[in-house]
Image: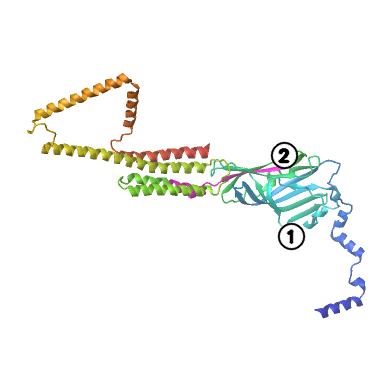
């Protein structure tokens, strides 16, 4: 390799210098003939620090967008990440050249031209793509119109209302403003109205679908003045089918599973208790999992929280139903056992003659009857006297006792097994009714 370079150097020294180099006037003529006009000619006397039409009115800048993708929509951070192609057009009379052609300039020469100071006010993070080179395009037309296009990925804030989550509809915006030039310097406009934005119609998202979009022209008012602003509004409708399969169906199945205990015998305490406790714990885990992907710092009561709360209430109610049924069953059994024991004692007493006697001889039936009647009359007389004494003392205490006795009689269940029979109909009917109200409210109101 060194030998070849040495030979080439000797050859160049031997021949005429003009044969190995281009004279300056030849280089200039070659540029003028190939590029009409040349960049050097356009840039002669050009001041990139002064905007076009300086002291002659504002510069009109047309905008258009291509939405390449919306990569992520975060409910926790309330933002979305999008990749866009931003195109800006304006006319700079200093760049007029003869002819009808246009000149495409390397994007790295953007530092030689005046460009608008457009920015995204709601952007949290953004960057310009630079693989394999900076994704910029500058095209200069013969009438002085400049097309400046670039590819940007930005994470933009979006205020979300999650009260109807996951049946919600979010409206997000993409705003474009001028950083330093106010309305006296530049004016923004959409080049083709709503048609200035492309790509949203064919966009496919994981959990959302683009319902509609439109553009608007506005003004941003700050302490330093009024600045031009363009806004893209687009509505996103969440796909609820994913959440129905992931959250709603398991919740309904857990509620139905809790109803199985109504058909299990009340004597099977471990089985019914196990079903109730298991469904309650599983529902709690499901509720915690549904909240992990949502912001916890706000005060939203979301639709999914309401439904999970309804399901948890029915599951917990089924567990309480068994507690009540078991309590009244045990109470009823205690009364029955006590009554049975008394009957057995009476039967044994009547059969064996083990009753209190005064004489050694067994009394006949007439004596027993007279004794019983006398006892009853004495009891009634004592009760009447006690009642008169209570009446004399005042009717306040007796009325309270009567009221408490009547209230206690309301909760007396003659047949505790009827509790399960009624629960088999009441729980499904109530759950169906609540579901109808829930879906009507969150889907149509």
The part of the chain drawn in magenta is 229-252
Residue 387, horizontal then vertical, whole percent: 27, 22
Q: Earlier in the sequence, mark 2 or mark 1?
A: 1
Residue 157, horizontal then vertical, whole percent: 65, 46
Label placed on residue 133? 1
Quarter of the picture holding the N terminus: bottom right
Label placed on residue 383? none
The one of 270 and 291 positioned closer to us in this rendering: 270
Cα–Cα span, label 2 and label 1: 34 Å
Q: Quadrant of residue 234?
A: top right
Q: Quadrant of residue 31?
A: bottom right
Mark 2: secondary structure: strand
Q: Is residue 377 shown left or right of residue 11?
A: left
The one of 30 and 235 positioned closer to us in this rendering: 235
Question: Which residue is outermost to the top?
Answer: 392
Mark 1: secondary structure: loop
């Amino acid at each position: 390799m060194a030998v070849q370079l040495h030979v080439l150097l000797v050859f160049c020294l031997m021949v005429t210098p003009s044969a190995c180099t281009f004279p300056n006037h030849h280089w200039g003529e070659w540029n003028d003939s190939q590029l009409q006009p040349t960049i050097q000619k356009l840039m002669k006397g050009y001041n990139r620090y002064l905007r076009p039409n300086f002291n002659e009115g504002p510069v009109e800048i047309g905008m258009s967008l291509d939405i390449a993708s919306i990569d992520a929509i975060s409910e926790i951070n309330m933002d979305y990440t999008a990749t866009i192609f931003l195109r800006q057009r304006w006319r700079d009379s200093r760049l007029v050249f003869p002819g009808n052609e246009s000149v495409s300039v390397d994007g790295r020469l953007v530092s030689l031209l005046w460009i608008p100071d457009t920015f995204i006010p709601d952007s949290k993070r953004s960057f310009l793509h630079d693989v394999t080179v900076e994704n910029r395009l500058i095209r200069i037309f013969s009438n002085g119109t400049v097309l400046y296009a670039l590819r940007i990925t930005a994470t933009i804030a979006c205020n979300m209302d999650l009260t109807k989550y996951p049946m919600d509809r979010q409206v997000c915006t993409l705003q474009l403003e001028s950083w330093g030039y106010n309305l006296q310097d530049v004016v923004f406009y959409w080049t083709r109205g709503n048609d200035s934005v492309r790509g949203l119609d064919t966009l496919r998202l994981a959990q959302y679908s683009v319902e509609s979009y439109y553009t608007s022209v506005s003004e941003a008012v700050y302490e330093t003045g009024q600045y031009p602003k363009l806004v893209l509004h687009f509505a996103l409708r969440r796909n609820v089918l994913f959440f129905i399969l992931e959250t709603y169906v398991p919740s309904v199945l857990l509620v139905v599973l809790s109803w199985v205990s109504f058909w299990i015998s009340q004597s099977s305490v471990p089985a019914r208790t196990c079903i109730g406790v298991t469904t309650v714990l599983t529902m709690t885990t499901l509720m915690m999992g549904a909240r992990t992907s949502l912001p916890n710092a706000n005060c939203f009561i979301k639709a999914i929280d309401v439904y999970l709360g309804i399901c948890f209430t029915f599951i917990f109610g089924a567990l309480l139903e068994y507690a009540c049924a078991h309590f009244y069953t045990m109470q009823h059994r205690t009364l029955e056992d006590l009554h049975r024991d008394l009957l057995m004692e009476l039967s044994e007493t009547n059969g064996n003659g083990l009753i209190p006697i005064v004489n050694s001889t067994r009394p006949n039936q007439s004596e027993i009857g007279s004794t019983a009647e006398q006892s009853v009359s004495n009891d009634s007389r004592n009760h009447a006297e006690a009642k008169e004494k209570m009446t004399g003392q005042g009717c306040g205490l007796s009325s309270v006792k009567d009221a408490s006795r009547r209230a206690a009689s309301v909760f007396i269940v003659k047949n505790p097994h009827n509790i399960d029979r009624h629960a088999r109909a009441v729980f499904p009917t109530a759950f169906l009714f609540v579901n109808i109200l829930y879906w009507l409210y969150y889907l149509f109101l």
